[in-house]
Amino acid sequence: MEHTVVSASKFNAWFGDNHVVKDVSMKIEKNQVVAVMGPSGCGKTTFLRCINRMHELIPGATAKGSLKLYDDEVYTMNPIYVRYKIGMVFQRPNPFPNLSIYDNVIAGYKLNGLRVPKAELDTIVQKSLTSAALWNEVKDSLHKKGTFLSGGQQQRLCIARAIAMEPEVILFDEPTSALDPISTSSVEQLFHELKANYTLIIVTHNMQQAARVSDKTAFFYVGELVEFDDTKQMFTAPADIRTQNYITGRFS
Amino acid sequence: MDARLGLRNTKSILFKAVIIFFAFVITIPLIIVLLYIIKQGVMQVNWHFLTHIPAPEGETGGGIANALVGSVIIVAMSSIVAIPVGMLAGIYLSENPGTRLAYWSGLCVDILQGVPSIVVGIVVYFWIVKPIGFSAVSGSIALAIMMLPIVIRSTEQTLLLLPPSLKEAALSLGVPYHRVILKVIVPCGFAGILSGIILSIARIIGETAPLLFTALGSNLFSTNITKPMESLPHLIFTYATSPYDDQHDLAWGASFILLMFVLLLNIFTKLITRKWNIQL
């Protein structure tokens, strides 16, 4: 199918002997927001980190099975190329403390030593910060350090940094769990705008957030993908009893 | 009840008084030494003193130009070797904690740090001086060995303090590992690494023992690194033990200069950590 951006089939991941992602198969379509939820330790973050091959950076971590970006196997591609194509935003905002706001946005170019004309960089910075709804707040202080911003602003700066690379997919690992409610809602607002151009995969602890922002939701439980369906369907009439129990708060 | 409470309060106050007293006491020897060296040395220092070589025995005047230049050359050569090697080893240790290589090389660093400087000197004497002769280069090698563990440990400790999320941020942008280290990790820890380097220079600039039988010393002005070369601590050692008062004065003056050097390096380090420290 042409619209499938990321597809996993019988995908497994381990930490040493610990089997944390079990036989996951799913297809993620273009320009959708997919929420991945589940209780702590269910493998959702590990699965996310496999998609851009950040999982393997942890000593002892392994993965097996098929995981494709369009038609290419992610695990046979050069990981550096995979990470160009699949951006990531982390749980805690992590702008580079040694770089200005401007340089943080173009960090992907700068740190990779890609030569881009200054005028083009200016455009990239403005465009990315605008897409991340941060431009108006920082346009007069582009050359200040990124770490002077508030937590919510820093997280949007990290989103701008991911957008600047023009990826196909952006992964979010519990992007609002370190933010206050106001910053959270501004980041959630962004998801709606970003999906016009990107495919978003968001790991979240927060069911309300999954319900608010996503088109489709995946429910992980002890390493298995229990259910993957339209968000509305999932929250109103889940097919699996475990999903229902989780959504109704019988376990967390 | 009230009486016991009062007793406890008194004990607390007493304890506080004792620690304040000793915190104060430990500054006294330092101040006495400083004042004495300044008193003895400051009168010697003038332009002539800094730009002339020592006068022949029995004559008055003369300066420490040869030792000053020699110390700078020897320390600079040590730094050229020890700083890059130490930084790279420190990066390895901070990046791979828990590996077998990190454990053993970390242990070696600790042992190396504890090796007395005279032992370092004698090893360099047997390995390098014996085959090629006394020279500034062999002195630099001895000092570089003294410098290495300090640079390695300070680099390692600084980099270990950086949050792992920083590295992940860079890797997730597709930045290759070597660029992550060189463009993100090292710049973020730069203030800490640099202050470690400066402190290691301050540490070796006053080392005398390893220079006694490596760079040897010289009464003449020399910039030839394959020949014996004078250095500040060595000049102090030879002239302080000589029978002539003029040479004693020279040694005091040189002590003062050396002291100022170390003091300035320490102040400089404090300034760097304050100014360039990156807020995480």
Image (cartoon, grey):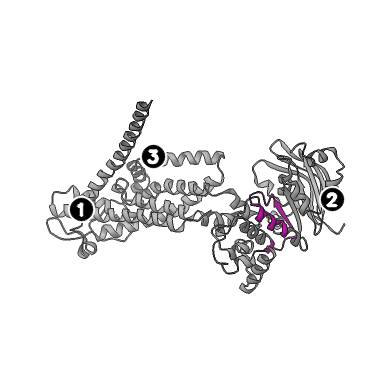
| Residue closer to the observer: A24 or B130 | A24
Residues in magenta, as a range: A163-190
Residue B114, disc: 3
Q: Which residue sits at x=39%, y=57%?
A: B271
Chain letter of mark 2 equals A
Residue A232, disc: 2
Residue B218 higher or lower than B20, as above or below: below
For disc 2, the neighbor class at 10 Å (few under 14, some 14 to 19, many from 20) is some
Instruction: Give the residue type that dot 2 points to.
Output: Lys
For disc 3, the neighbor class at 10 Å (few under 14, some 14 to 19, many from 20) is few
| Residue closer to the observer: B67 or B161 | B161
Badge 3 and badge 1 in a common chain: yes
Q: Name the residue under label 1.
A: B252
Q: Distance between the residues labelled 1 and 2?
A: 86 Å
Tag 1 secondary structure? helix
Q: How far apart are marks 3 and 2 (CA)?
A: 67 Å
Chain letter of mark 3 equals B
Instruction: Give the residue type that dot 1 points to.
Output: Trp
Whichever of labels 3 and 1 marks the residue nearer the N terminus, that label is: 3
| Residue closer to the observer: A199 or A70 | A199
For disc 1, the neighbor class at 10 Å (few under 14, some 14 to 19, many from 20) is many
Q: Distance between the residues labelled 3 and 1?
A: 29 Å
